[in-house]
């Protein structure tokens, strides 16, 4: 049974479904890519990054390095005007059922000198010399042998297509988040002094796969926060050192833990962030409760004005005003980031790119935001959590839902 979490919310006049229609989602994504190729005058795409290949083709591959996926990485070729992408892969069992057989090919090896001739031959079969092609990664053999094409960064096409999610993409992110939150609920129930950080990771990783996750995307973070910045690791930027790697450190009574984790489910990422207190008898102090309440007020201030047409600059100013004029996020982070096939993608709100960039970034239906402000009190640590929302035709809808233990407030 699926809860009615979307409550009639729409994107582009289409209701957000309780569960994603995967075939429709893949078709809609490809249509967005074709639209951007036409709009930007690009003849095609040559995609080597695993997340980009999955976005263009819907194909799964074994979980390996997120950018390269090893020697047998898949390659996607998108030709402007064609009805389907071409997929070159050794992993045919991950190809969607509806993928046309005449567009499915054996693997290419663009990383190898021994394989580049076959790679060039394949591209010459799709594009004429001088064609303008977007690429997300170029190997040394490619750089040496493919000078007869005009190469451009595929980010312009991919970014424009990815930033506005379809209703099925929003639903897929919600499903990935639901699995993550159920697993985190299991971890939260067993948290106590004497456990190690790695114990929590083991519990979480086992649970996500029991619940149906297809891959883990982020090494789970259980960072114990020191009362002051000076007591933590030194940083070049002078702000908090976050995140730090999980170790076998033993958790002690009263430890303040900043939790962060994310999985991959059906190609889409989740993002979970909370502040927990390690104790056998959860009872936040008045100061800790005040930090949480300020964090919630900052998020609410931004969400109160969030709707299509609002700029990132306006959202940032609303959050800063609620925090008494102080920027409520870390120097090397942001107020909010997007999420989709990658755990962090556009839109990015609260960057160091300046007010011109923030003012030009306008919210639209289908944008997904992960709000992650930080409330820090030097000498008393602080509070950090993450909430995910999707911009709809009239406002926004919540995609995350786990309560804010130990503060006993529902998301």
Image (tube, rainbow, N blue to C red):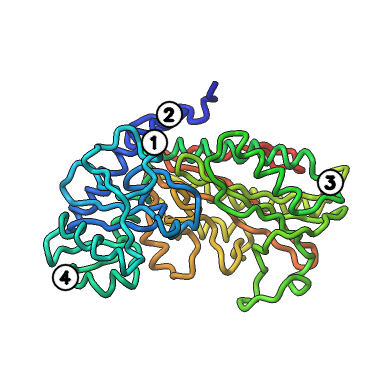
Residue that label 1 marks: 167
**Nearer the camera: disc 4 or disc 1:** 4
Circles 1 and 2: CB distance less than 8 Å? yes
Left/right placement of residue 199 relative to residue 217 reads right
Q: Label 2, secondary structure: give it.
A: loop
Cα separation, mark 1 vs mark 2, equals 7 Å
Vertical relation: 376 (above or below) 77: below
In the rendered structure, which disc, 1 or 2, sits on the residue that comes first in sequence? 2
In the rendered structure, which disc, 2 or 3, sits on the residue that comes first in sequence? 2
Residue 234 is situated, as x and y percent measured from the top left of the image, at 70, 76
**Residue at the (34%, 49%) spot, across then down:** 89
**Residue at the (47%, 28%) spot, across then down:** 18
- In the image, 402 versus 251, the foreground residue is 251
Residue 283 is situated, as x and y percent measured from the top left of the image, at 84, 45
Query: Which part of the image, by quadrant, shows the C terminus?
Result: top right
Residue that label 4 marks: 148
Please rate how many residues cluster around mark 1, counting C-alpha atoms within 10 Å: few if below 14, some from 14 to 19, many from 20: many
Vertical relation: 326 (above or below) 92: below
**Nearer the camera: disc 4 or disc 2:** 4
Q: Does residue 411 appear in the picture of this structure?
A: no
In the rendered structure, which disc, 4 or 1, sits on the residue that comes first in sequence? 4
**Residue at the (47%, 44%) spot, across then down:** 268
- In the image, 231 versus 176, the foreground residue is 176
Please rate how many residues cluster around mark 4, counting C-alpha atoms within 10 Å: few if below 14, some from 14 to 19, many from 20: few
Q: Label 1, secondary structure: give it.
A: helix
Vertical relation: 76 (above or below) 156: above
Query: Which part of the image, by quadrant, shows the N terminus?
Result: top right
Q: Does residue 46 appear in the picture of this structure?
A: yes
Vertical relation: 151 (above or below) 26: below
**Nearer the camera: disc 2 or disc 3:** 3
């Amino acid at each position: 049974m699926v809860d009615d979490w979307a409550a009639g919310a729409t994107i582009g006049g289409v209701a957000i479904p309780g569960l994603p229609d995967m075939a429709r989602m893949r078709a809609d994504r490809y249509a967005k890519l074709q639209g951007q190729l036409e709009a930007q005058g690009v003849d095609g795409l040559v995609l080597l990054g695993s997340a980009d290949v999955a976005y263009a083709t819907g194909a799964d591959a074994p979980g390996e390095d997120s950018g390269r996926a090893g020697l047998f990485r898949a390659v996607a070729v998108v030709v402007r005007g064609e009805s389907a992408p071409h997929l070159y892969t050794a992993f045919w069992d991950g190809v969607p059922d509806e993928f046309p057989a005449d567009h499915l090919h054996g693997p290419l090896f663009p990383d190898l000198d021994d394989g580049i001739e076959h790679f060039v031959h394949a591209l010459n079969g799709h594009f004429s010399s001088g064609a303008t092609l977007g690429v997300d990664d170029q190997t040394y053999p490619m750089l040496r042998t493919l000078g007869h094409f005009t190469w451009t960064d595929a980010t312009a096409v991919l970014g424009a297509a990815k930033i506005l999610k379809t209703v099925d993409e929003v639903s897929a992110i919600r499903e990935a988040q639901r699995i993550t939150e159920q697993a985190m609920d299991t971890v939260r129930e067993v948290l106590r002094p004497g456990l190690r950080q790695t114990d929590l990771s083991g519990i979480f990783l086992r649970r996500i796969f029991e619940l149906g996750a297809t891959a883990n995307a982020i090494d789970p973070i259980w960072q114990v926060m020191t009362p002051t910045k000076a007591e933590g690791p030194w940083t070049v930027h002078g702000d908090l050192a976050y995140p730090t790697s999980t170790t076998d450190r033993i958790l002690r009574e009263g430890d303040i833990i900043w939790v962060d984790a994310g999985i991959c489910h059906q190609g889409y990422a989740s993002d979970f962030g909370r502040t927990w207190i390690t104790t056998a008898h959860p009872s936040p102090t008045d100061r800790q409760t005040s930090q949480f309440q300020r964090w919630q007020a900052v998020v609410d201030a931004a969400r109160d004005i969030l709707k299509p047409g609002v700029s990132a600059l306006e959202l940032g100013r609303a959050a800063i005003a609620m925090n008494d004029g102080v920027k409520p996020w870390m120097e090397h982070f942001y107020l909010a980031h997007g999420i989709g096939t990658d755990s962090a993608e556009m839109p990015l709100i609260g960057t160091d790119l300046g007010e011109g960039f923030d003012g030009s970034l306008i919210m639209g239906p289908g944008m997904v935001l992960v709000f992650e402000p930080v409330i820090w009190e030097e000498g008393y640590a602080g509070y950090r959590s993450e909430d995910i929302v999707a911009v709809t035709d009239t406002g926004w809808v919540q995609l995350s839902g786990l309560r804010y233990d130990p503060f006993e407030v529902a998301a």
